[in-house]
Image (cartoon, rainbow, N blue to C red):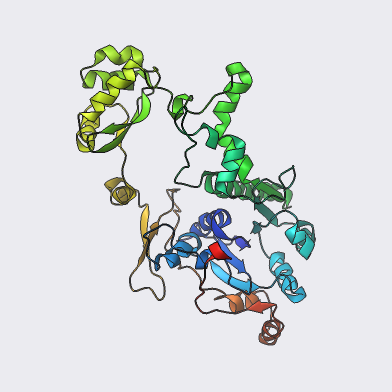
Amino acid sequence: MSLPLDGLRVLDLTRLLPGGFCSLMLADFGADVVKVEDTGMGDYVRWSPPYYEGAEQTARGALFLALNRGKRSIRIDLKNERGREVLLRLAGDADVLIESFRPGVLDRLGVGYEHLRQVNPRLVYCAITGYGQDGPNRDRSGHDMNYLGLNGLLGLTGEREGPPVQAAGQIADIGGGALMAALGVLVALRERERSGEGQFVDCSMFDGSLSWLALVAAAMFAGGGVPGRGELPLAGAVVCYRPYRCADGYVTLGALEPKFWAAFCRGVGREDLVEHAFDPPGSDAHQAVCDVFASRTREQWRLFASEHDCCLEPVLDFDEAMRSALVASREMVVELEQPGARSPVRLLGAPIKLSRTPADPTRAPGPALGEHTHEVLASAGYSTQEIASLHEAGAVAGAAASVQGSFMSA
């Protein structure tokens, strides 16, 4: 079956999470994503350490596969003049190029946007950076938490008077970077259908994750005052919308609308609390609700929510969530055959469901480092002799043995 992005040619020069996740979504929907890696050790995520304490060393390959299934890999030395010529040639036939270097790096090498658009005016060039192509932080290094710290999102997350709380998912990297970049690329491709020209997509993880606070900013700009940590209705400030400890764990109560809060209160025999939905933590109403939740287990509350429609669900540990009927029914865990693996690798599936042309996250395994160098060069018109010459000059490199090390100590 044809996939929605069949025929779309993407050059992915990124490393690690934001760019890898962006091009993964394009690959899952059929784009031919060529992962351009250096002639050394390639994408850092290939040789990353176990993702968390206690994870098996064998999981490091799964980390790479989680972001790079369905892609092809070519190794090019962009510090080599002939290597840069290879990239320019590949860009001549590409629809999209995605990179995540600091602003100006590829310009200094002679393969930035202005150079590439001379070769291919239809190219959509997407740069994913921490702080964007201009502004005072343009050249600063950063990671997910830094961007959230500077745009106010981290400062608003947590309990009043408590410390900022880090999220388990990378909000800036994925929500502000990868997803915004994918949208920007698709918007620019749609516009190209009218104009015939590509353009530069400037995607800042700082900007993207700041946009998550659209409602907060609108309220403040309209004279609502400056909110503090734990003072937002959707971030812990009201009794009706909070996590609660129960007899054997935690549950979430999201009874924001009056009908849901009333259903909860009446269901537990506390109709006297109906008028106190928006009381703050520490109030008498809050303590009463805490006592109610502490009297039952997560399973008892799950059954309660099946009878009383009040937006109440258990807080699952991650392994419980992955075994749940909900995850299975939504096909959010898939198995992928990977060469060299003794058994299929389990990964998260595609989150976007199309009715006629759904994504295929299992269509191809992740590439070995430089596995497709010869194939990609040949398809670009290089002869066997020319490819051999490029290898000899160190401009490109072919398939490499398994890589070792840790970028944490690089």
Task: Give x and y (percent) for residue 295.
Answer: 20, 28
Left or right side of 393 for 280: left
Residue drawn at (77%, 74%) of the image: 81
Image position of 271 (left or right of 216): left
Q: Give how far across and how far down residue 204 sits, in percent.
A: 64, 45
Residue nearest the viewer, comparing 84 with 270: 270
Question: Height in image: 339 above or below 350?
Answer: below
Q: Is residue 86 left or right of residue 61?
A: right
**Residue depicted at x 47% and y 38%:** 165
Q: Position of residue 108 (x, y in %)?
A: 79, 61
Q: Is residue 5 visible?
A: no
- Can the viewer see residue 31 in this picture? yes
State the residue at coordinates (71%, 73%): 86
What is the residue that sits farthest to the bottom in this orientation? 385
Quarter in which the C terminus is drawn: bottom right
Displayed quadrant of residue 233:
top left
Q: Residue at x 31, y 14 (%)?
A: 274
* Residue 380 in the image: above or below residue 385: above
Q: How many marks?
A: 0
Q: Split into 4 quadrants, where in the image is the N terminus?
A: bottom left
Question: Residue 317 versus residue 198: which sits nearer the camera?
Answer: 317
Q: Nearer the viewer, residue 51 or 88?
A: 51
Image spot of residue 98 (x, y percent): 64, 57
Q: Is residue 201 above or below residue 395?
A: above
69, 39: nearer the viewer? 39
Left or right: 120 with respect to 143? right
